[in-house]
Image (spheres, rainbow, N blue to C red):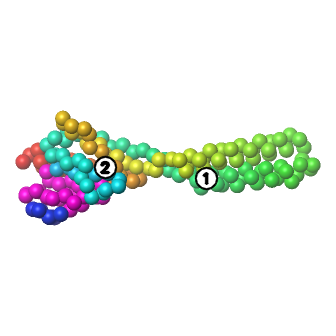
Amino acid sequence: MPSGDEMCALNVQLKQDEELVFETVRAVLTSQRLLANLDKRNRDVVTDDVSLGKVSNFKKASGGQESRMNMALKLLGVGVFLMLVQLVATNVMPNLMELLLFLAGALGIVVSLYLILGSLLRVKPYTSVVFSVIGSRDVPVFFSGAESAEADELIKLYVRTKRDFTIT
């Protein structure tokens, strides 16, 4: 593990007697500090640098939606197929059957368009870990994907490091 004045993620200078515990693109956990970057344009800059002694607790949350594009396209295909069957067999089928096919096809198309729009405009799945800091604003750290293993690893290492930090 790097120590002393070596460089690590986010262009962070480690202090003397400080060890790197966890490192990701958006956050660095050392034996003494939590460092995070919230600036999407400049990923090398540390926007939050907090001593572990000032972090009181954390909260993990997941958000966003998975894409439903595959289901929407299948439903669109079924809706269009039912509409085509209804149009081709107009003179052969009874009126009630024709009406039911039209309604089922139209419903499939409308619902699929709703799902397609929802998939295009959705917030992608993410996991956030928000660290509460005494006397300052909270420090959020974001990870892509719902229930991120990286977020779980950060939490596990934070708890262990915080416990060791408190003891020393």
Viewer-nearest of discs 1 and 2: 2
* Mark linked to residue 106: none
In the displayed structure image, the side of residue 122 where residue 156 appears, left or right: left
What's the distance in space between the residues labelled 1 and 2, CA to CA?
Answer: 34 Å
- At x 8% / y 46%, what residue is drawn? 167
Q: Is residue 141 magenta?
A: no
According to the picture, the residue beneath numbered tag 2 turns out to be 38
Residue visible at 55% across and 49% down in the picture: 119
Numbered range of the magenta stretch: 8-32
Amino acid type for the residue under numbered disc 2: Leu
**At which x and y percent is residue 80?**
74, 52
Label 2: how many Cα within 10 Å (few below 14, some 14–19, many 20+): some
Residue at which label 1 appears: 71
- x and y percentages locating residue 151 in the rendered image: 32, 51
Left or right of 43? Residue 3 is left
Residue 27 visible from this viewpoint:
no
Residue 64 spot, x, y in % from top left:
45, 46
Q: Residue at x 37, y 48 (%)?
A: 127
Q: What is the residue that sits farthest to the front in this orientation?
A: 41
**How far across and how far down the image is residue 158, in percent?**
21, 49
- How many marks can you see? 2
